[in-house]
Every structure is written in C-alpha cells, then in structure tokens.
Amino acid sequence: MSLQHPIVAIVGATGAVGAELIASLESRAFPLERLRLFASERSAGRRLLFRGEGIPVEQLNEDSFPGTDIALFSAGSVVSRRFAPMAVRQGAVVVDNSSAFRMEPAVPLVVPEVNPEAIARHIGVIANPNCVAIVAVVPLWPLHRHIPIRRVVAATYQAASGAGAAAMEELRASTAAYLQGAAYQHRVLAHPYAFNLFSHDTRVDPATGYNEEETKVMRELRKIMAAPDLRIGVTCVRVPVLRAHSIALTVEFERPIAPEQAREVLADASGVRIVDDVAGNHFPMPIEASGQNDVLVGRIRRDVSDPSGCSLAMFVAGDQLLKGAALNAVQIAERLISG
C-alpha cells in the first residue's frame, strides 16, 4: 500500500487506547483524508474531538468498512476476531491491538524499530504486540544486534492502564476510599488495588505455572526478534500505578559486555532515552515515562551473579497506552502509507 491520504477507521474509539490513537494521529500529523470512529451501541452518537472537529462515533456493524483504507482495532480479541476479517474483505488493512492474531504464522507481529520489513508480508492483518513485549524489545533489540542475547529474565511492574480505562478508574476510586477509611468493593480487577500489588490476574497454566500474560510476552518476544530459541522467563505483576509499565531486565549475552558499551548502543537507538543518573539516584520511573513516546532505560549495570561478564541488569519504563499500544499502531500505519 502506498496512499497519500488514506481513510482511517478506529474501532474501540471511546476506550483508553482509542483516545490515544486519536491523539497520536493528530500529534504526528498523520496525513489522512478522513477519520471514522467506531464503538459499541452504547457509545454511538458521541462526538470526539480531532483536529478541532467533533467526529461522530458510529456503531460498529458488519458493513462499517467499505472505503476504509486502514482500520486500527483496539476493542478486544472477541471484536477483532469477528470484525477484522470483515474489514479486510471490504478493502482495509487492519492493525490489531488485541491478542487475536499475534501468534498466527501468516500475521506479522511488528515493532517498527525492530522488524519494519515484516509489514510488507501482511495479507490484510498486522498485529500490534503485547504492551510489555513492546516496552522490553525496544531496548533489547539494539543490544541483541550488537551482541546476540542468549537469555532474558524479566519482572514487570504493570500499571492500571494495561487493563483499560475501567481499571484506571478503579485505582483512583479505591485509593480515594482507602485514604478516607471507607470500604470499597473492587469489581474490575480480581484483588484490591489501592496500596497493593498482585500477580497479573490472567489464567495460570497448571503445566508450566506461567500465566497467560507471561506466556504472551515470552512467545511474542521470540517472534518479533525472529529468535525462536531465545530463553526467556517472565514474572508479570500488577502495581498501583495509573499509567506506564516498568520492567526489571537481566540479560545474558553470547559474549562479555560492559555497561558502558550498552549505554553507547542504547544512546543511538531509536525509541530509547537513557535515564541513568547514578549520582542523583535518578532512574526510569513510570511517572516520567507517562505521556512519552520513548522507552526510558537506566540502572544499567553488570549482573554480579554472572562471573563471565556476559550479563547485564537494567530497568526500563514505557507508556503502555502510547508506545505499548496506540503509538506503535500509528507507527505501523505510517509505514503502510510510506510504502
């Protein structure tokens, strides 16, 4: 596809990621001819602002996509599985933010800083990866190109934004209730959220002990990096932060690597900003990553448990709603129209 001014649709326009898709298209001056917004019946008729104009939200149905060139989906796997094939049949290229198609062999799983060439292999659908996989791979990839990575061990600190607008509101409301000494009945997440943290509440596989979020991250990193034998272990934890995910990474390379080498590589990497002020004890924080396009990387140091010198530890933070979702999708769409 090489379109100068495509017609773009957003499916799930009223959700947290939908709002960021609209904002990213506007802030990046995406050269679209027309923007169409879709959501469920209860949101139809609302108007959302784009470039100073109120765009009406339409109810999503089976005939929503004729004339649409690019459809950005962010409405969950059930909606994507039903409506994305319809959008493709009606002429659109779908960039899907759900997990519905990510591991299908024929569907490219794309982070533009890593594997933009995969976009050209699409047959109608391009998958946007899991937010944790995106935030992790942006700094891992340039290091992997410098010295191949053998193994990654990660622990995530995942914000409410990863569970959507309702979870963000539950964190706000439950925190206010807690501070007032009032009772609060959580409904969106499985456990009390204010001043608490808990294992990511997706189903645990009894055979492996890993939950679905952890399994997604491991599988998707291998696919994005085209490294099917990469050894990865992940523990995913939900923390009481409104927005932006953080990850502690321990990375083993094929050869020894010094922290100074890693800093040099990352300083030149697209989509990365180093925040590594040892003297000031200032390292990546979700409050500073929120609203930022780049993934923040710091606490870059030797892993002293590995006497070979082949391992580094680091800490990263990235905005789950932006680079972890909406921005990555818009960057894919930019590549689509540029050919």
Image: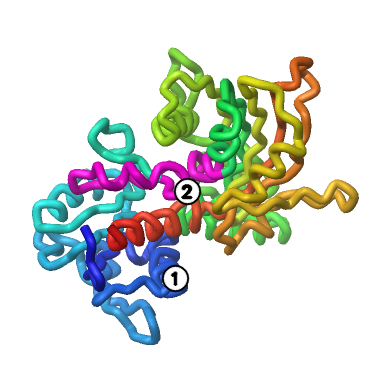
Quadrant of the image occupied by residue 178? bottom right
Q: Secondary structure at mark 1?
A: loop
Q: Relative to 263, does residue 252 appear above or below in the rendering?
A: above
Residue type marked 1: Arg
Q: Which residue is drawn at the image coordinates 63% and 40% (left, top)?
A: 247
Image quarter hosting the N terminus: bottom left
Q: Position of residue 215 (x, y in %)?
A: 45, 27
Q: Which residue is mark 2?
A: 113
Q: Position of residue 162 (x, y in %)?
A: 50, 49
Q: Is residue 266 magenta?
A: no
Q: Relative to 19, does residue 204 appear above or below in the rendering?
A: above
Instruction: Bin the neighbour count of mark 2 within 10 Å (Cα to Cα): few under 14, some 14-19, many 20 and up.
Output: some
Instruction: Bin the neighbour count of mark 1 within 10 Å (Cα to Cα): few under 14, some 14-19, many 20 and up.
Output: few
Q: Which of the two residues, 257 or 81, is positioned nearer the viewer here? A: 257
Q: Which residues are magenta?
A: 111-138
Q: Which of the two residues, 172 or 223, is positioned nearer the viewer here? A: 223
In the image, 281: left or right of 258?
right
Q: Secondary structure at mark 2?
A: loop
Q: Position of residue 107 (x, y in %)?
A: 26, 39
Q: Which residue is drawn at the image coordinates 44% and 53% (left, top)?
A: 325
In the image, 115: left or right of 121?
right
**Alpha carbon distance from label 1 to label 2:** 17 Å
Q: Which residue is mark 1?
A: 28
Image quarter hosting the C terminus: bottom left
